[in-house]
Image: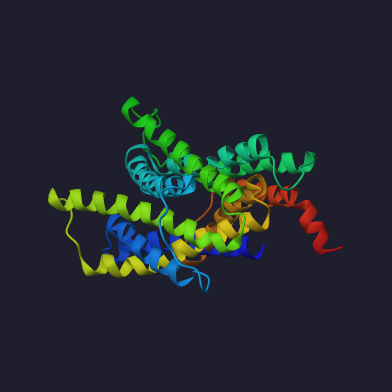
Amino acid sequence: MLYLVASIVLSVMLLLNFRLFPRFGVNTLQAIVFNYPVCFLTGYLLMPAGQTFSLDFGQTWTWMAFALGVGFIVTFLLSGASTQRSGITATSLANNLSLVIPVAFSLLVLGGGKVFDGFNYLGILLALVAVGLSTYQTPEPGQATTQAKTNALWLPIGVFLMSGLTNTIINYMNVRYITEPGRTVPVTLTMVLGAIVAGAVLLGVRLAQGKERVESRNVLAAFTLGVPNFLSFYTLVMALTAFGGNGAFVYPLYNIGVILVAALMAALFFGEKLSGINRLGLGLAVLAIGLISWQELSGLFA
């Protein structure tokens, strides 16, 4: 449970970074591209003593991990485009509701870990409702209420599919290939290398087109983003390992936990207010967490 809590806190730190970037004139795209080398360095330093890192393209998991790193960049690009063209609400809902993909895969395909009962299934259902209500935003006066144009409708769908796909692959790799904690860092570093390559190509093209100009503040921001970025992912993988690869248990708790803590931080440090619907969603989130993990919670008081 400690790894899960750490992953939630570190993930919220990423959101706080993104929230602060505009105040300091940081280019978010460059910060994300440069954060991956920082991620790699952080992971390399965390590698267990006596263990070395090398790429073995003869292994299936190497290609999967490398492609998954590319998926990280693609998901980010889709999220950025979707936020600009389809709105923050649609993008947030698509990203958070994507948890149904790894949950369904874990229950129907992997079938590992915890045996779910009726309360657990009810908790998962309420978690989905809570995510939607917690991220719902009432349209501002004068804001268009019609559906987004057809050419932009695919963007939230892309965010939903890519985010769900990457989390599902992570869970699958955790069950099939990261069966020992000592292998977590090497596999994760391979994913990060994939993201570094994809990011370098992306930024290189934009620099060649004259659409980007590298500034020192963006490189510095990569450190405040890269360290918690790697650690949030690392602790999430460790949480999956600790719970026997049971994504059906870990991912709902992780997603709801990030929403709750982020909402608290937003209210305390940025003065963001929640609507009545948002508060209802947060309440359902707490109830969902209790139902999903009632066996573990009851064990704490036994």
Residue at x 63% of width, y 56% of height: 241
- Residue 114 screen position, x and y as percent: 74, 47
The residue lying furthest to the front in this view is 58
Residue at x 20% of width, y 65% of height: 215
Q: Is residue 147 above or below residue 102?
A: above
Near-viewer residue (117 or 110): 110
Q: Is residue 258 above or below residue 9?
A: above
- Residue 205 screen position, x and y as percent: 19, 48
The residue lying furthest to the top in this view is 150
Q: Quadrant of the N terminus?
A: bottom right
Q: Is residue 230 above or below residue 154?
A: below
Near-viewer residue (55 or 194): 55
The residue lying furthest to the right in this view is 302
Near-viewer residue (5 or 43): 43
- Residue 212 screen position, x and y as percent: 18, 54
Residue 71 placement, left or right of 12: left
- Residue 55 screen position, x and y as percent: 40, 56
Near-viewer residue (14 or 59): 59
- The reply to whether residue 13 is in sight is no
Quarter of the view holding residue 89: top left
Residue 127 placement, left or right of 146: right
Residue 136 placement, left or right of 199: right
Q: Quadrant of the C terminus?
A: bottom right
Q: Number of labelled discs?
A: 0
Residue at x 64% of width, y 35% of height: 109
What colour scheme governs how the chains and residues are painted in the rendered image of this protein? rainbow
- The reply to whether residue 184 is in sight is yes
